[in-house]
Image (cartoon, helix red, strand yellow):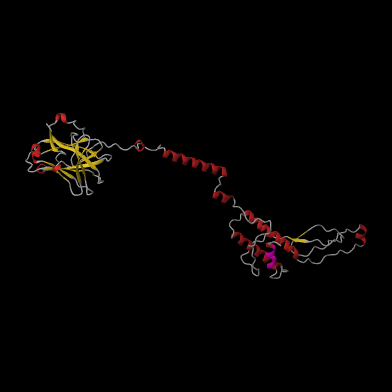
């Protein structure tokens, strides 16, 4: 016995199953329970719902046939002979009034005079729709699974498939993933090989740092600050000595700075090293030298190089008393001995005292040293 039949029979046992009106209420309740079960399962399609409804209708037809009487044998109609019709025919027998009964269909034919049992009748059950009000009908639970073989799990209908969209076949998915992976690998190697880099980004060599001057408050107009090779400017200039390593008494080093006379293959020099505070080493410029420069356009020349293997940047400040200063200069100093020039236009007045040229050996405060070979000055014609 499947779940549908069991539910209907359990409901019939709760009342008078011989009462046709009671059975009809049970059948209506069965359809109503089916509708509730279908509404609670949105995955069921219209086709499956129709099949479930027809299954209940067929089961009701089968159950209803058990409550209807069998059809009695049908007597044949015999026409009397002509003589008897005139002389005295057999009396016509009329059947009594027919009792009301539901429409039936005879299952098979009945032969006249046959001793076979009376044929079984099948009720013609209409498509009973659920009624909102079913007084006296017991509750029927149609949520139980259908009979074996009935479809209970149904794929979404065509409309739902259109909403979700078509699924790509495995071949298309594999092709798409492979294509994306190839593109990603190509981009990675292109980035690693520098395809998208500019020429400046591809140039990974250490930047060349030719000796240059950076002036915070003074910009020369004649390029006199460019470093020159030692002796390059000697042919046309009369130089006045400002500092020589042979007389280091005119050099002042703060407590955290160092100044030491040393010598290499070319000449003696003064190795200066600024302290962690960035303090500078001061070189005296005598008052007599400043008196010669008053009212003149002068060019100063610092001959120096960096300590072996330690390129650095130096800064130069001047204090010439009544004659002013030279502004702050910055130079990149390399391993080769070079001349670092700057010019000053002095006012035409008496200096009143000596001046100084202060050199910071490492503008970045990393403790790098500079070898100073000479400081000198000449007057522009």
Q: Tell me the quarter of the picture where residue 130 sits.
A: bottom right
Residue at the (72%, 63%) spot, across then down:
63
What is the x, y in percent for residue 105?
76, 59
* Towards the viewer: 28 or 257: 257
What is the x, y in percent for residue 266?
21, 34
Q: Quadrant of the C terminus?
A: top left
Q: Is residue 355 left or right of residue 40?
A: left
Seen in the picture, residue 101 relative to 364 is either above or below; the reply is below
The total of numbered circles placed on residues is 0
- Report if residue 297 is visible in the image: yes
* Towards the viewer: 284 or 210: 284
Q: Is residue 70 left or right of residue 243?
A: right
What is the x, y in percent for residue 302?
18, 37
Region rendered in magenta: 5-11
What is the x, y in percent for residue 352?
7, 43
* Towards the viewer: 371 or 288: 371
Q: Quadrant of the N terminus?
A: bottom right
- Report if residue 319 is visible in the image: no
Q: Tell me the quarter of the picture where residue 207 sits.
A: top left
Does the segment drawn in magenta span residue 269? no
Q: Is residue 82 left or right of residue 17?
A: right
């Amino acid at each position: 016995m499947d779940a549908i039949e069991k539910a209907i029979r359990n409901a019939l046992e709760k009342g008078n199953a011989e009462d046709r009106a009671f059975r009809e209420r049970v059948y209506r309740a069965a359809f109503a329970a089916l509708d509730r079960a279908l509404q609670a399962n949105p995955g069921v399609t219209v086709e499956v719902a129709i099949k479930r409804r027809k299954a209940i209708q067929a089961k009701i037809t089968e159950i209803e046939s058990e409550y209807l009487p069998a059809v009695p044998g049908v007597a044949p109609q015999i026409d009397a002979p002509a003589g008897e019709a005139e002389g005295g025919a057999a009396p016509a027998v009329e059947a009594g009034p027919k009792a009301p009964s539901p429409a039936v269909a005879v299952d098979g034919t009945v032969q006249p005079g046959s001793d076979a049992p009376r044929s079984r009748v099948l009720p013609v059950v209409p498509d009973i729709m659920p009624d909102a009000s079913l007084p006296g009908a017991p509750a029927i639970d149609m949520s139980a699974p259908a009979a074996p073989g009935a479809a209970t799990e149904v794929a979404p209908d065509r409309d739902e498939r259109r909403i979700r969209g078509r699924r790509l076949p495995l071949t298309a998915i594999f092709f798409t993933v492979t294509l994306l992976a190839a593109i990603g690998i190509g981009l990675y190697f292109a980035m690693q090989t520098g395809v998208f880099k500019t020429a400046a980004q591809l140039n990974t060599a250490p930047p060349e740092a030719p000796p240059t001057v950076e002036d915070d408050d003074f910009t020369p107009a004649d390029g006199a600050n460019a470093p020159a090779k030692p002796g390059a400017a000697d042919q046309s200039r009369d130089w006045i000595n400002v500092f020589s390593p042979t007389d280091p008494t005119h050099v002042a080093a703060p407590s955290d700075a160092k100044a030491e006379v040393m010598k290499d293959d070319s000449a003696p020099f003064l190795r200066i090293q600024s302290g962690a505070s960035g303090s500078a080493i001061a070189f005296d410029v005598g008052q007599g030298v400043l008196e010669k420069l008053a009212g003149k356009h002068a060019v100063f020349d610092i001959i120096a190089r960096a300590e072996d293997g330690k390129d650095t940047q130096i800064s130069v400040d001047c204090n010439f008393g009544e004659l002013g200063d030279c502004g702050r200069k910055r130079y990149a100093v390399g391993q080769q001995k070079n001349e670092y020039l700057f010019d000053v236009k002095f006012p035409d007045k008496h200096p009143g005292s000596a001046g100084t040229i202060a050199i910071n050996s490492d503008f970045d405060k990393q403790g790098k040293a500079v070898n100073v070979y000479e400081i000198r000055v000449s007057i522009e014609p």
